[in-house]
Image (tube, grey):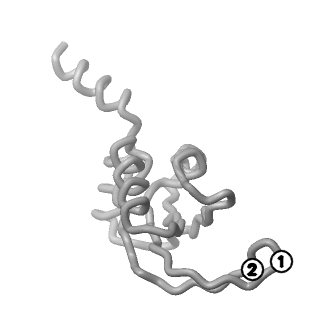
Amino acid sequence: MAQAYVQVTTTTDSRAEAAELAKAAVAERLAACAQLVGPIASTYWWEGEIESAEEWMVVFKTTADRFDELASLISEEHSYDTPEIIATPVVAGSMDYLAWMSEQTEPAEMDEAVDDAAVD
């Protein structure tokens, strides 16, 4: 079966938090890339009221099989009570870029196993 890919988005109220989430996801190899977009203007319902806020969006590029771990990281590290965590399937893309995404999101223990095998 072919590898499936997703873009995962979240928003936060500061560039600093967006950057921290991006760096954590990439460092843990839960995303090959994370892009910050903002500031953006958001309007939404919260606790029975219409709210408006300036936010920063993070777009994570990852494989579908890393989504659950990425969603857990976002939930644990995010300052919002109910953070946006939305995955959008990637239906097509450059084969080179998709292969790079797969390579960059291999779990760290896979990197170590490859390194160990190269030494033997």
Which amino acid type is shown beneath numbered disc 1?
Gly
Q: Secondary structure at mark 1?
A: loop
Instruction: Compare residues 25 and 101 and report the one nearer the observer.
Output: 25
- Tell me: 50 left or right of 2: right
Instruction: Compare residues 39 and 9 and report the one nearer the observer.
Output: 39
Residue under pointer 2: 45
Q: Residue at x 27, y 27 (%)?
A: 114
Q: Which of the labelled discs sits on residue 115, or is there none?
A: none
x and y, in percent, of residue 50 in the image: 74, 85
Q: Quadrant of the C terminus?
A: top left
Local packing at callout 1 (Cα closer than 10 Å; few below 14, some 14-19, many 20+) is few
Structural distance between the alpha carbons of marks 2 and 1: 6 Å
Q: Secondary structure at mark 2?
A: strand
| Above or below, comparing residue 86 to residue 70 in the picture | below
> How many tags in the picture?
2
- Tell me: 57 left or right of 80: left
Q: Are marks 2 and 1 in contact (CB under 8 Å)?
A: yes
Which of the 4 image quarters holds residue 29? Answer: top left
Q: Residue at x 31, y 64 (%)?
A: 97
The residue positioned farthest toward the right in the image shown = 48
x and y, in percent, of residue 51 in the image: 68, 82
x and y, in percent, of residue 69 in the image: 55, 43
Residue under pointer 1: 48
Which amino acid type is shown beneath numbered disc 2?
Trp
Instruction: Compare residues 8 and 24 and report the one nearer the observer.
Output: 24
- Tell me: 21 left or right of 4: left
- Tell me: 67 left or right of 99: right
